[in-house]
Image (tube, rainbow, N blue to C red):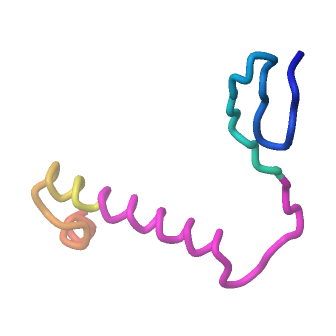
Amino acid sequence: MNTRTNTYVTEDQGRLNNYAVEPKMYVDSSQQFGFNKYAEKLNGRLAMIGFISLIGFEVLTGQGLISWLTNL
């Protein structure tokens, strides 16, 4: 027979079985506006994607975005 406490199980022979404690999950469904962590993180990620895309565009075409737009 197993004896159970909050974070571990001890078997009849005295062996200890440790299990990971699962964190309690919750969802915050309230809308947030302005400067919050999610908006700033998303803005930073999109800026990084744009910057890397611009570098890739310059490598592929051999010219910058502004010079490419003026030569259309």
User: In the depicted view, which residue is nearer to us: 39 or 9?
Assistant: 9
Query: Where is residue 51 shown, x and y percent of the image?
Result: 32, 65
The range drawn in magenta is: 26-53
Residue 18 x/y as whole percent: 68, 33
Q: Is residue 67 left or right of residue 54?
A: left
Residue located 80% across and 75% down the image = 32
Q: Residue at x 66, y 84 (%)?
A: 35
Q: How many marks?
A: 0
Residue 22 in the image: x percent, y percent?
75, 43
Q: Nearer the viewer, residue 27 or 31?
A: 27
Please state the horizontal and vertical placement of residue 47, each as a whole percent of the image.
Answer: 43, 68
Question: Outermost residue, left direction?
Answer: 62
Left or right? Give the position of 8 relative to 50.
right
Q: Residue at x 18, y 67 (%)?
A: 64
Q: Quadrant of residue 3?
A: top right
Relative vertical location of residue 70 with respect to residue 11 in this rendering, above or below: below
Does 28 sit above or below residue 23?
below
Q: Main secondary structure of the magenta part?
A: helix
Q: Is residue 37 left or right of residue 3?
A: left
Q: Judge whether residue 45 is colored magenta.
A: yes
Q: Quadrant of residue 71?
A: bottom left
